[in-house]
Amino acid sequence: MAILFDTIPSTLLVPGVYTETNANRAGTQNPVLPKRAVIVGHRNASTAMVAAGTPFRVFNESDADYGGGAGSWLAESLRVFKRANPYCELWGIGLAPGGGATAAAGTFGFSGTATAAGTFVAYVSPYRVGTTLRGRYAVAVTVGMTAAQLATALQDAINADPYRTVEANDDTNDCDVTAKVAGVNGNAIFLGHSFFDGERVPAGITCTITAMSGGATNPTLSTAITALGDAHTTHFVQPWTDSTNLTAGEAEMVRRWGGTVQRECHMFTAAVGSLSTLTTLGDGRNNQFTSILGVGLSPTPPWIAAAELAAIDAAMDHPGQSLRGRALNSMIAPAAGSEFDGDDRQALLADGISTYTMDAAGKCYVERLVTTYQEDINGNADSTWRDRQVAGTLFALRYDWRSYIGSKYPNYLHAADGTKYDPGLPVVTPSTMRAEFSTRARLVWAQGNAWIEDPDQFEEDIQIERTDDGMDLVGVPNLINRLHIVRTRFDFLR
């Protein structure tokens, strides 16, 4: 019987008791699935301490400010992610505005003179960080205050906020605001007032909102993709939904899922707009590794919502479990009457846009996280990859299998069935590999983790062939499904 050693030669002559260790069997239990998130976004060029296009690690919220610049859209996205999921490895990549980009602008227009004291409350893309509500500006109004005075007071309130998304400038009776960052996303900045119950414009004053517009030209996402390198990033968050950047991101996700790359990653983004706008966006995409949250008419910036959604997904222990009911704590619900109803959300989901719901208190919750995949290569409707969890579960299977086999059989030889070899020799046969495949599916993927069902069928479907340099296997896992819908009929009696 031959037992082979890695570090103790058979020619050793010096007396002694020599012992080596080998971890081949120690790492065969359930591996911990890696979770690494990267958020790309607009940096604050004047305060960011990390150069544009350079990845930086975020251990805490101060790292977000250091790398992205305090108050930047990127730093705030990183902060919201960290609040929702403090344990996931997190990185940021800040980008400069695209070449020739223009900044969106809007206006709070005032008229009249206050005839009663009160408080004017303006909102500029509000969102929550913990218990703090960002983007809310309350201005005390006294009797006799003019429109011009109110415009100036609002300007001062906005510009005093280090986390503001706009710069304000009073212009006679108007408070003009301009996005701090040039580009298309500035058009998504919400401007409003008296949003919550109990808030109202003081008597004698009128406010007219001119929505943000004019933002043009996004950065190029390919810069951030290059910066990602070969690290195994599982969650990629980026704020741009223009066709060029989505296409670049989708192509990178597909590449990373390739059989020889195996750096599985999923892209998360979000978009504001009407039902028509969002269904058109979703209908124009078709990628199994991309999810777009339909923020709709929520005043919360889409880049904030996308970051929190990715954080929630990364926090899930089971890759196949639905995110339904998980709180989107940063989001502010749309105004009453402007939320999407059931028929609207059905249309969104059918067109590959993920949805959320809200309760009576205005708190938002994930409803269903889907991908933009809707058609197969022949243009036929196909629901195979609809739920994000399909890719998540396949990642778990693939990662577990390659980790298990890679650690247990790192330097083995392979031979045909039928020949007996000493147990100490590193030789594996097709029957042994078949048994490993079947046992792993039954004990770990099905019984231990509920990633798949019907392991008996899996065992029957296994195919295996020897090649000159290894073995080729085919497995047909029946992935576990999510309990999204329960249909019931009551045939009642009287």
Image: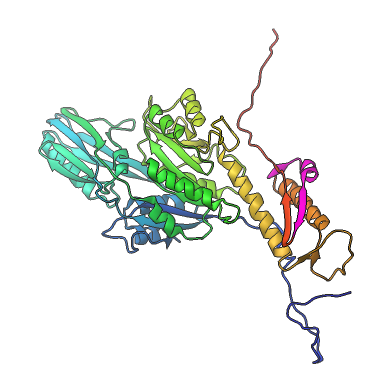
Specify the color scheme.
rainbow
- Segment tinted magenta in the rendering: 451-467
454 part of magenta stretch: yes
Quadrant hosting residue 169: top left
How many marks can you see?
A: 0
Quadrant hosting residue 406: bottom right
Picture coordinates of residue 178, whole percent (x, y): 22, 44
Residue 75 in sight from this viewpoint: yes
Q: Residue furthest top?
A: 494
Lateral position of residue 386 relative to residue 359, left or right: right
Comparing 381 with 94, the one in front is 381
At horizontal 59% and vertical 56% (from top left) the residue drawn is 260
Residue 311 in sight from this viewpoint: no
Q: Residue furthest bottom?
A: 14
Picture coordinates of residue 464, whole percent (x, y): 77, 51
Picture coordinates of residue 73, whole percent (x, y): 34, 50
Picture coordinates of residue 311, whole percent (x, y): 49, 48
At horizontal 45% and vertical 29% (from top left) the residue drawn is 360
Lateral position of residue 320 relative to residue 14, left or right: left
> In what quadrant of the picture does the C terminus appear?
top right
Lateral position of residue 124 relative to residue 367, left or right: left
350 part of magenta stretch: no
At horizontal 56% and vertical 52% (from top left) the residue drawn is 264
> In what quadrant of the picture does the N terminus appear?
bottom right
Measured along the vertical axis of the image, is residue 367 above or below residue 425? Answer: above
Measured along the vertical axis of the image, is residue 469 above or below residue 299? Answer: below
